[in-house]
Image (spheres, grey):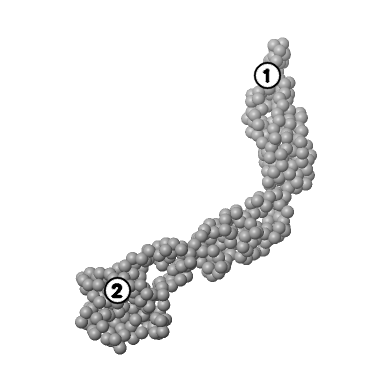
């Protein structure tokens, strides 16, 4: 400002003290606003504006903003598109600003108004705060945008034929209400849930207004031919039938990583016969809870011959040995009340302690072809002189291999 102008202004304010406090101020007024296109979700729009200082004193720098409104009155309650710094402006001076913004997903549809708001934080004292905005009519092209906002499952270890409970929440981040559609639930081999995955079931989802969500729990039955021993994903995909035109289909699905396994089982069968220390018992344990491929099972004998040996028998059948039906009563060969419960295909010896206990650990191979297969085991206790055969026998144990 020229020295003469400053002196004139000061003289005028000195002559009228009551007006000084009201007019010895800057006054920011937007004088120009232009935009490059209508406002579609995700679209890019360039905004140009000019802000003038119509006051009688230089302004300090401040923050201004571009807003999108449903009416021509721009307020800070409208949708803020971008903030920018307005530098200090001299008396009757002006500053220009340009920026390119990405239109938010939740923009509405129909006639709307773009506006610039000078000093939108009301940081400056001004002659007037009623002239800080400038707006223009434009068009907004809002759409719904459906997505899965939350998802979880009742267990991350799934099993063929069993039911898993999935809880999912479906939301609309778009600016307009979506139509009714369906939610599909899928089994996938990867983390990207799509309608090309294996469909398990569907549910109907009603219309969702902007910013709203709806959720529920769904029972999913795992198919009997699902891949086992591998990681997979259970997921939900909203609008699985493509009924709703929306901003993006890329975020419609979400999943939870799970692992499909086959349960390994131990089961005891057959009768044991008494020896010198009483009747022996055969059990099996696995630290993983069941016999699985690539794990180790401990086969245990209790109450067997003390400080001696027992023969661990492993067989492929419990039904017959060649043409001999099992269990086979061993009374006829000198072991009263004893039975051969398994085919003696593999024989291994173990030592026992003073209590008559022994153990043999077997590592199951890491081969998928053994999943679901069974083999059978039994201990034959060496007890010379106890009976004519010199052997007593434990019960049998069936081992059916699963996979984690």
The secondary structure type at the circle numbered 1 is helix
Quadrant housing the N terminus: top right
Judge depth for marks 2 and 1 and give the one in front: 2
The residue lying toward the viewer, choosing from 358 and 198, is 358
- Tag shown at residue 401: none
Left or right relative to 4: residue 391: left
Q: Nearer the viewer, residue 268 or 16?
A: 268
Q: Is residue 215 visible?
A: no
The residue sitting at 69% across, 20% down in the picture is 90
Q: How many marks?
A: 2
Q: Residue at x 69, y 37 (%)?
A: 101
Secondary element at tag 2: strand
Query: Label 1 belongs to which residue?
Result: 17
Using the rendered view, name the quadrant where residue 332 is placed: bottom left
| Image height of 329 relative to 372, above or below | below
Which x, y percent locates residue 29? Answer: 73, 28
Q: Residue furthest top?
A: 4
Residue at 23% x, 84% y is 387
Q: Nearer the viewer, residue 303 or 115?
A: 303
- Image check: 60 left or right of 398? right
Residue 241: quarter of image:
bottom right
Of the numbered discs 2 and 1, the one sitting upstream in the chain is 1
Image spot of residue 374 (x, y percent)? 43, 72
Above or below 117: residue 258: below
């Amino acid at each position: 400002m020229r020295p003469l102008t400053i002196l004139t202004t000061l003289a005028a304010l000195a002559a009228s003290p009551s007006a000084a406090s009201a007019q010895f101020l800057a006054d920011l007024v937007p004088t120009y606003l232009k935009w490059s296109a209508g406002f579609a979700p995700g679209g890019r729009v360039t905004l140009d504006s000019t802000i003038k200082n119509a006051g009688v004193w230089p302004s300090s720098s401040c923050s201004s903003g571009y807003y999108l409104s449903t009416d021509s009155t721009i307020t800070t309650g409208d949708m803020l598109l971008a903030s920018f710094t307005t530098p200090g402006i001299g008396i009757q001076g002006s500053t220009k600003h340009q920026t390119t913004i990405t239109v938010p997903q939740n923009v509405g549809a129909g006639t709307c108004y773009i506006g610039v708001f000078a000093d939108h934080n009301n940081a400056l004292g001004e002659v007037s705060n009623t002239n800080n905005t400038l707006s223009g009519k434009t068009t907004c092209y809002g759409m719904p945008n459906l997505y899965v906002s939350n998802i979880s499952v009742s267990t991350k270890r799934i099993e063929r034929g069993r039911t898993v409970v999935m809880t999912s929440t479906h939301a609309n981040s778009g600016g307009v209400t979506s139509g009714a559609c369906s939610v599909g639930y899928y089994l996938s081999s990867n983390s990207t849930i799509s309608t090309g995955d294996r469909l398990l079931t569907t549910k109907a989802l009603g219309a969702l207004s902007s910013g709203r969500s709806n959720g529920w729990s769904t029972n999913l039955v795992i198919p009997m031919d699902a891949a086992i021993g591998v990681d997979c994903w259970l997921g939900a995909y909203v609008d699985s039938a493509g009924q709703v035109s929306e901003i993006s289909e890329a975020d419609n699905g979400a999943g939870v990583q799970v692992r499909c396994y086959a349960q390994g089982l131990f089961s005891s069968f057959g009768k044991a016969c008494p020896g010198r220390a009483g009747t022996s018992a055969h059990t099996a344990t696995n630290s993983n809870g069941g016999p699985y491929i690539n794990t180790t099972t401990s086969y245990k004998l209790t109450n067997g011959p003390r400080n001696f040996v027992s023969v661990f028998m492993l067989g492929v059948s419990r039904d017959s040995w060649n043409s001999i039906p099992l269990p086979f009563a061993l009374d006829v060969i000198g072991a009263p009340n004893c039975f051969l419960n398994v085919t003696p295909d593999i024989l291994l010896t173990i030592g026992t302690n003073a209590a008559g206990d022994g153990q043999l650990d077997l590592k199951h191979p890491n081969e998928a072809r053994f999943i679901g297969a069974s083999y059978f085991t039994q201990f034959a206790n060496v007890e010379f002189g106890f009976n004519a055969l010199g052997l007593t026998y434990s019960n049998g144990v069936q081992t059916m291999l699963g996979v984690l």
